[in-house]
Each structure stands twice: as C-alpha cells, then as structure tokens.
C-alpha cells in the first residue's frame, strides 16, 4: 500500500507514516452521535489544557516535533493554530462532511497531521518521498503548488496526493459519494509509531460511528527501520 523511497529513508530515518484503509463507508453531511462525540471531545481538550497560555501550549511534545519540521520551511504548523483557536478563542472543530470531521476530531485530539482521500480515485500503490523541489500538484484549494525541497509528500501513480507543508490535493478529495477511504498520517522525528497507531484507531472508531458496517482493510505504521 505504501512504498518508502530511499530518498525519504535517508533524509528522515527517524520519521514514520501511518495508513488506514476502510471500505464500505458512508459520508453523510451530519451525524448526531458524531456531533455528540465532537462536543465532548472539545470539552475534554479544553480541560486538558486548562489554564495554559500560548507559551505553555507550545511546549506540548507533539507540537514541538511538528514545529521543528515546519521551521525548516519558515512555516507554522496549522494544527497548532487550530488548537489555539479552540483553547483561546472558543472556536469549535470545523463542521464539515462527517468522514472528514471524523479525521479532524482525531487530528485535534492527538495533534497529528492527517489527510483523507477517496480510495477509488487513487492509482495504487502509494509512495512516500522527500521532494527534490519544484514538483507540482493542484491543492485542495484548486491552485497549482510547487513543493519545497525536502518536504515529505505522498503520491500515487497519477501524481502527488499531499505534502506536509501544503496539504492534500484536489483530485482525490473525499466527497459525498465516497465509499472507500484512505487516511494517511505524517509523523516527523519525535513522534513514535505507537502514537500514530493509536491515532489511526481513533479515526477508525470515529468512522465506525458513522458507518458501523465499514471494514478496515489496513491499519499500519511505516518507518525506515
């Protein structure tokens, strides 16, 4: 399902990636039980960080691992900013179609960078690589984007599906018609495989809340070792 290139292994020997493949899913615009779980999660996250301001929040080890990666590209980890909006501005986890919301919930719970794709739009296998610089793809916002040298990215046989810095592509995005789905997790150095696996299992449980008959085809963490 996911092939690791030598280029990626050489540059990121202590990093990992996770893949979750589920078949027979549905993607309704709303789901009452998922909404209930999302509200409970938001309250739990606020309780977890109660009394902390930005400097204390930034000390979280997962955020530090991602910020170390993003700093190399003069960027800020967007999940860090989303967490601050929940904790300091009273915002909620974004309300979108339920399959994506299931992913967002786990992403905000564990702070691990995750992308979701319609499996039926992919040309397998997937490949995890490190950019040479200049590779291009159309992002979820519909704009053509060139990758920065060294940025991790995942591609299929037709092109790039996502990169850490610029996010998922437009071509393989989850839609109301999605029946089979793949979620991928980027875990730079400092984030161990056990946390990635636990994160994938949270996504799996969220999806099963929406689609209890869905089947998990693959749940695996990949690394250079």
Image: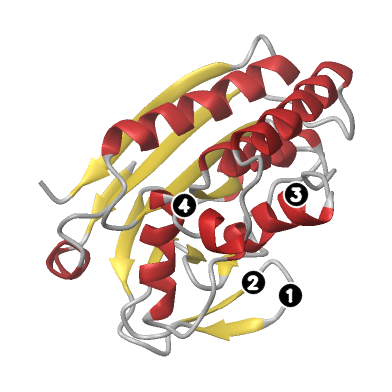
At mark 2, the secondary structure is loop
Residue drawn at the location 73% of the way across and 75% of the way down: 142
At mark 4, the secondary structure is loop
At mark 3, the secondary structure is helix
**Label 2 neighbourhood size at 10 Å, few (<14), some (14-19), many (20+)?**
many
**Label 4 neighbourhood size at 10 Å, few (<14), some (14-19), many (20+)?**
few
- Rounded to the nearest angstrom, the CA distance separating label 2 from label 4 is 18 Å
Residue at the limit of the structure toward the bottom, as seen here:
134
Counting residues from the start of the chain, the first of labels 2 and 4 encountered is 4
| Residue 167 x, y percent position in the rendering | 57, 65
Report whether residue 156 is seen.
no
Callout 1 touching callout 2 (CB < 8 Å)? yes
Residue bearing mark 4: 123
Counting residues from the start of the chain, the first of labels 4 and 3 encountered is 3
| Residue 29 x, y percent position in the rendering | 89, 35
Residue at the limit of the structure toward the top, as seen here:
213
**Label 3 neighbourhood size at 10 Å, few (<14), some (14-19), many (20+)?**
some
- Rounded to the nearest angstrom, the CA distance separating label 3 from label 1 is 27 Å
Q: Is residue 164 above or below residue 35?
A: below
Residue bearing mark 1: 142
**Nearest the eye: 167 or 139:** 167
**Label 1 neighbourhood size at 10 Å, few (<14), some (14-19), many (20+)?**
few
- Rounded to the nearest angstrom, the CA distance separating label 4 from label 1 is 20 Å
- Residue 26 as seen in the image, left or right of residue 133: right
| Residue 164 x, y percent position in the rendering | 47, 66
């Amino acid at each position: 399902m996911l092939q690791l290139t030598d280029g990626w292994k050489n540059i990121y020997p202590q990093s990992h990636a996770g893949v979750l493949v589920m078949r027979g899913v549905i993607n309704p615009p709303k789901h009452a039980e998922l909404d209930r779980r999302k509200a409970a999660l938001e309250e739990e996250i606020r309780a977890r960080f109660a009394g902390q301001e930005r400097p204390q929040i930034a000390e979280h080890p997962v955020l530090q691992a991602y910020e170390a990666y993003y700093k190399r590209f003069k960027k800020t980890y967007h999940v860090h900013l989303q967490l601050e909006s929940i904790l300091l501005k009273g915002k909620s986890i974004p309300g979108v179609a339920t399959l994506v919301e299931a992913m967002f919930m786990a992403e905000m719970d564990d702070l691990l960078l995750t992308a979701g794709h319609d499996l039926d739009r992919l040309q397998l296998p997937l490949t995890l690589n490190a950019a040479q610089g200049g590779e291009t793809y159309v992002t979820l916002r519909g704009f053509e984007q060139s990758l920065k040298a060294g940025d991790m990215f995942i591609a299929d046989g037709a092109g790039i599906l996502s990169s850490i810095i610029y996010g998922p592509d437009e071509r393989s995005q989850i839609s109301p018609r999605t029946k089979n789905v793949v979620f991928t997790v980027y875990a730079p150095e400092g984030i161990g495989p056990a946390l990635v696996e636990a994160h994938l299992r949270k996504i799996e449980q969220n999806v099963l809340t929406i689609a209890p008959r869905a089947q998990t085809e693959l749940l695996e963490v990949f690394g250079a070792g």
